Image: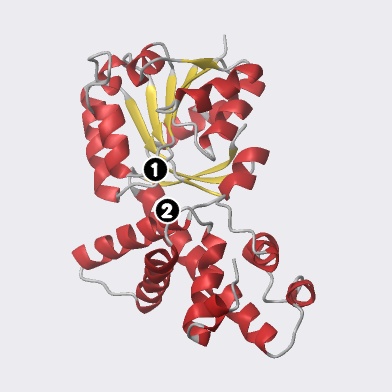
Amino acid sequence: MPRTVALIGTGIMGAHMARRLAQAGLPTTVWNRDRGKAETLTQYGVSTADTPSAACASADVVIVMLSNGPVVEEVMFSADAAGRVPVEAMRKGATLIVMSSIPVETCQAQAQRCAARGVGYLDAPVSGGEPGARDGTLAIMAGGDAALVESLADVFAPMGRVTRIGPVGTGQMTKLSNQIIVGATMAAVAEAMHFATQGGADPAAWRTALMGGFADSKILNLHGQRMVERNFVPGGPAEYQLKDMRTAQAWAEKNGLKFTLLDCVEDMFSRLIERFGTGLDVSAIMREVERSAGGQEAEKKGKP
């Protein structure tokens, strides 16, 4: 019999992940604060649960795809509307896979609490955004027991490519390092594009010219197109990028380290959100680049 899966959090990425798991033949139950978002998945054979504990109780594998560490703690390790703690509702021998981006120390503490109950634990954050979740091409960075990761190959496969990094916590460390690269590259593409267009370059032609050369990247390809089109509807919200940058900074500070590029990127995204608010895609860093490069000119021109 195929193992049963519960997925907690059917947001921008979680909904696609649940759909792909169900389409792969894995009986899948979901829970989401906004039940309406969960119920849109019933057309793919996904079941919905009234509470997180109800979703977890009969699952062999519970996948968490929530926004941040405090939310994961609240939803999975506190009593829900049914009066049950979801992790305590999980049966012995089941596995909790936290695919959210959360602090390293948080997932390590969660792993200990799960182990005390006979529940396996992996931290397995992802990269690839909404397109990766939709197409099943996510890069999955797993921290935890190697044999446990290998045993869950059938669960990971519909969602993307999994790589076991090391013990619990190393998945989160890899995700944070990924976010340093993503944030810096996003800012570099935005700044370079704005630089070129201020000299008269057509942004679409500029992007096409660079693709295939040493400056090429998925960010130039996918997010560069968003910048050209000025399509900043979130696939990957900028506030999540900022959250990860600040988590990385906190870890670095705790360990007596300082990273210049990390601090620079965090500052840029902080100013973006302070100036333009939340609910924007990470590619909207273009708006902050325009503002800081040209004073108020970008806003005076009425750019969206």
Q: Are marks 1 and 2 in contact (CB under 8 Å)?
A: yes
Q: Where is residue 219 shown, x and y percent of the image?
A: 62, 63
> Which residue is tagged 1?
67
Element type where label 2 sits in the image: helix
| Snapshot quadrant of residue 116 | top left
Relative vertical location of residue 271 with respect to residue 59 in this rendering, above or below: below
Residue 18 can be seen, yes or no: yes
> Which residue is tagged 2?
240
State left or right for residue 212 relative to residue 115. Answer: right
Mark 2 neighbour class, 10 Å CA radius: few under 14, some 14 to 19, many 20 or more: some
State the separation of the CA atoms marked 1 and 2: 8 Å
State left or right for residue 208 relative to residue 11. Answer: right
Residue drawn at (52%, 86%) of the image: 294
Residue drawn at (39%, 71%) of the image: 271
Q: Where is residue 135 shown, x and y percent of the image?
A: 67, 40
Residue 107 can be seen, yes or no: no
Q: Where is residue 16 shown, x and y percent of the image?
A: 59, 34
State left or right for residue 185 relative to residue 260. Answer: right
Q: What label does residue 177 carry, if any?
A: none
The quarter in which the N terminus is drawn is: top right
Q: Residue furthest bottom?
A: 199
| Snapshot quadrant of residue 77 | top left
Residue drawn at (27%, 21%) of the image: 80
Q: Where is residue 266 shown, x and y percent of the image?
A: 38, 69
The answer to which of marks 1 and 2 sits earlier in the sequence is 1
Element type where label 1 sits in the image: loop
Residue drawn at (37%, 55%) of the image: 173
Amino acid under disc 1 = Ser
Asked whether 78 or 260 is in front, the reply is: 78
Amino acid under disc 2 = Tyr
